[in-house]
Amino acid sequence: MSRAPEKKVSKPVATSGVKVHRYFPGKAPEGHMDEFSESEAETEAKTERTVQLPAGASFGASTKLTAATEVLSAPMRIGAGIGNTQQENEGFSDSDAESDGETRRLMQARLLARQRANEEASADSGSDSDSDSGSDTARARLRASMQIRKPEGTGARAGATEASGSGSDSGNNSGSGSSEESGSSSEDGGYAVRPMLKPMFVPKSQRQTQQNPQNPQQTQQSSRAAAMLEDENGEARDLGAEALARMKEARREESVRMAAEEARRAREQPEIDNDEHAHLVDDTDDVDPEAEFEAWKLRELLRIKRGKEEGEVVDLEEQERERRRNMSEAQKYAEDIEMVRKQREEKIERARELRMEYLEEQDAMRLDVAQDSSEVNAIMSQQMFEYAMINAEGRRSHTKWKGHSKEDTSRAGPSLWEESMRAAQRSDTRPGTGSARNPRNGGRGQQRRSADD
Amino acid sequence: MANRTVNTATTIHGTNPQNLIDKEYRQRIYDSLYWKEHCFALTVTGVMDKAANLTCIGGCFGDNKRPTEFMCLVLKLLQLQPDRQMVDVLIDQNDFKYMRALALMYFRLTERPVDVYTKLELLYSDYSKLRRRIYDGTYVLMHMDELVDDLLREQRVCSIALPRITDRRKLEDVGELPPRISPLDQNDSDSDSESGSSSGSDNDESGS
């Protein structure tokens, strides 16, 4: 093929050109606000504004909307309130005003949802006249929450990189506010997506954790260590060189003090050396000279006897060696064979004896099981007996596997395989497949006749 | 520094004399309080003084494998390597049996088989009582002649692995040693006169 290879024109893929919105936690993806909608009718309340509100945002009077949009008209980066992550902010940085609007929309939606939930809650308890006041209070609350965030928000705008800074700042300052937020969000009965708060480091001195009662020592130590690392204000200490030296000195003094305490304790309560037990064993001599002498005599005699026996053994060996040295090869061989034969016989005999003992024990037990020798019902008592033996011997590592040879079913009965082979052989009339030397029957011809023939 | 063998020491059984005690037990001795407190910078005379205060023999006992003072002093002697005369003095004295036991142990560890048999078998007739601390820390009564028997026949006494010595029979066969004549085999008159207990009592009137 001399034709130049065709350039592959990439077909426009369905997804190209469509803006794919990533999922960011805490932010509903675009176009899915429908899921939060309450009813279809309310979607008609959607008004045409510069700020396009999502269809599902359910709010009643347009006044509310105005208020919200007025407050929110100032473009601002979402701070800690909606729990933006760095990614999210960066995502926003690339996007146009539309994404700004989106976030704003999202925020609005959430706030209004919360509002509505509060209203509903109050409506359940109170009357409709509260709706206006409810809206006022809602607006006030909205404004209040906005005002917490707004200063930092306006201060840090348009730059995605500052968003995290703003986030941390707002987080810092809204440390107290965050609790409000979370508190209020819990009231709405879960209608709104809870704003995710950035975790904020709280120094140990300010933490309100429950001290673990099981490890009081640990907390002591840790608090001591913490105390060394922190000032009175609880802020982390800036460890300069001399500060470190001072810390080390303090630690050294501490350890010296502990050592001194230990030494004092050791001095006051000296280690009990079990010397009382030593006095139980009396090693004074001549308490009873005769008895001691007699004891010694006995020991000495035993030692002499032992020496003699050992000497005899050695002598015997020596004699044996002498004797064998003077024998011929044949004699030696005969002797060795005899010895080995005897050993083997003894071994077999011993095994036989043991087996007999075992069987006799079994017979005795069988009789016991039968309760009366006349009752010995062979099969039943055999089974019972076996059961009893199993119980007596124990069931550990008990198995029904009797061994490979017992599992061999090839000779037990008519084997299907063999049958088929034989049938095939019988029906095979080709020359050279006679029975005499046929590998199928092992070259034996038709010697073996089975029941099915 | 404090645990080095003395400069003038010769090798024993081809090795640093301290190595006659296993590394494990040796380390336990080095780490023990008695060693650090009492055995530091000791001379043979000092060892003698300490040995006079011994109350038991034994090796390492207890879960910690704590060494007895006896064992510490054995190691100290190995470090110092006193000469033969000194050791003989320590063995031959009749006043302190634990000192004698200490010296016997040292002798067994360091001397040649023939000398070991010759010297130690004399003490088969010493039946003074000794207190022995066994593996679990409790005490047991034993006698000097039993200790000698163990030293000559066992492989491990007081947590110390004894160097191999030739079988007595073999030495007899070769002719280096005469067969052992027990004091009981001698004339009956002699048996009563053998040196019985020897802790501070001179009670053998008739010489052997």
Image (tube, rainbow, N blue to C red):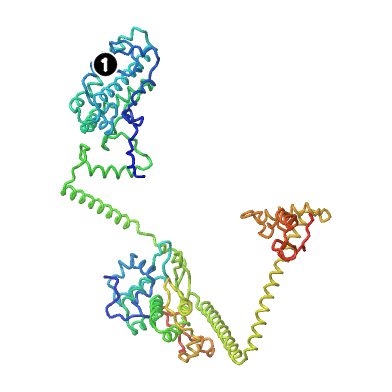
Residue A382: percent from left, percent from top:
76, 54
Residue A24 in view, yes or no: no
Residue A184 in view, yes or no: yes
Residue under the point 76% across and 60% down: A363
Residue B131: percent from left, percent from top:
44, 71
| Picture quadrant of residue B3 | bottom left
Instruction: List the residue tagged with mark 1.
Output: A68
Residue A6 located left or right of residue A158: right
Q: Chain of mark 1?
A: A
Label 1 crowding class (10 Å Cα cut-off): few <14, some 14-19, many 20+?
A: some
Q: In the displayed structure, would residue A34 be above or below residue B149? A: above
Given residues A151 and A40, the one toward you in this image is A40
Q: Residue furthest right?
A: A374
Label 1 element class: helix
Residue A236: percent from left, percent from top:
21, 40
- The number of numbered badges drawn on the structure is 1
Image quarter (top left, top right, bottom left or bottom right) of the C terminus of chain A = bottom right
Given residues A52 and A14, the one toward you in this image is A14
Residue B125: percent from left, percent from top:
48, 82
Q: In the displayed structure, would residue B144 be above or below residue A196? A: below
Image quarter (top left, top right, bottom left or bottom right) of the N terminus of chain A = top left
Residue under the point 18% across and 43% down: A238
Question: Please, what is the three-letter code of the amino acid marked with disc 1?
Answer: Ala
| Picture quadrant of residue A398 | bottom right
Q: In the displayed structure, would residue A206 be above or below residue B155? A: above
| Picture quadrant of residue A443 | bottom right
